[in-house]
Amino acid sequence: MRSQLPADAATAVRSYLRLADRILPGGIIACAATGSIALGAYRPGRSDIDLVAVIAEEWRTRSDLVRRLRLLHLSQVPRLTAGAVRGRGVSACCNTVFVAESEVSRPVTQIRPIASHTGEIFDQNDAFDVNPVVWKELTDGGIAVRGRPVSAWDVDAQPEALRPWIRTNLREYWSPLVAQLRDRPPQDSTTLLRRLLTSPRGLTAGTVAWCVLGPARMHHTLMTGEIIGKEEAGFHALTAFPDHTPITEVALAKIRGARIPSAQPRRQWRSLTASAMEDIIEDAQTVGKPTTN
């Protein structure tokens, strides 16, 4: 298990926690890195920094808590802007979920998050990353950057809920993205998704990577029970879905920061991405399920 953060991530996290201590003194009593850092898949300057922060119980009832967490989120804007200018998106800043001290040991699907921020988005009383996948990352490889080791947090990742949660996520999040790509936008599609997937300029390599590698990661977890990073998901897709190699290579090149392959014209990326997602999601409906005689 990794015990230290990569150097640039450590610098960013120290800066973030210093600001947190000014904005809500004594508020964050424990904090750990998850995501690509926990998976050993972090890429300096390209990967984002995912954190789970535990809020002291005495702060939980304060009327100004959410306002102060919003200020902490706003402190990330300069890093976010700098990252966007360099084409790195949210990799330039910390993305954090805030959980109360009294909630952190509850089964993950029963935790009521205080708030979260990812990139430019701040959510009150909501945090997508409080889920069985991220909590497995936390328990298997999470690195404490403040407070006790994660092993002493007494977290319950609910391993029995992992596969059901993934199947629901594929159905409720990833399948609607396929509909967007096929010009069949669902009624509840968001403005952000419409902008990313229906741009007249076509898909970016970053959007291709998100759409192809996300379901591939889920597929691998359904098969093995293990969580993998995006690059490993690309290798999995190449092996499990070789018919979609051209668009998977685009996704992998983006993740690696390598030259984007030109074998497939960009105007074809949309249909190739949708086809890859459809096949991965369809196969995922049965993979990992017990067989019956």
Image (cartoon, rainbow, N blue to C red):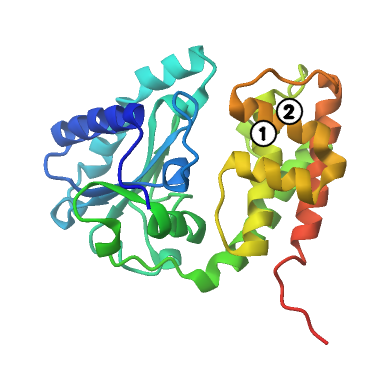
Helix, strand or loop at disc 2?
A: helix
Helix, strand or loop at disc 1?
A: helix
Relative depth, front residue between 124 and 274:
274
* 84 with respect to 240 (left or right): left
Circle 1 Cα neighbour tier, 10 Å, few/some/many (<14 / 14–19 / ≥20): many
Residue 138: x, y in percent? 39, 55
Judging by the rendered image, the residue that carries numbered circle 1 is 209
Residue 22: x, y in percent? 14, 31
Mark 1 residue type: Ala
Relative depth, front residue between 127 and 273:
273
The quarter of the picture where residue 110 lies is: bottom left
Relative depth, front residue between 291 and 110:
291
Circle 2 Cα neighbour tier, 10 Å, few/some/many (<14 / 14–19 / ≥20): many
Q: Residue at (17%, 53%) from the top-left corner? A: 56
Q: Residue at (38%, 63%) from the top-left corner? A: 111
Do the residues bearing badges 2 and 1 touch, measured as CB atoms within 8 Å? yes
- For the question of whether residue 194 can be seen, the reply is no
The quarter of the picture where residue 256 lies is: top right
- For the question of whether residue 49 can be seen, the reply is yes
Judging by the rendered image, the residue that carries numbered circle 2 is 250
Residue 65: x, y in percent? 22, 43
Structural distance between the alpha carbons of marks 2 and 1: 7 Å
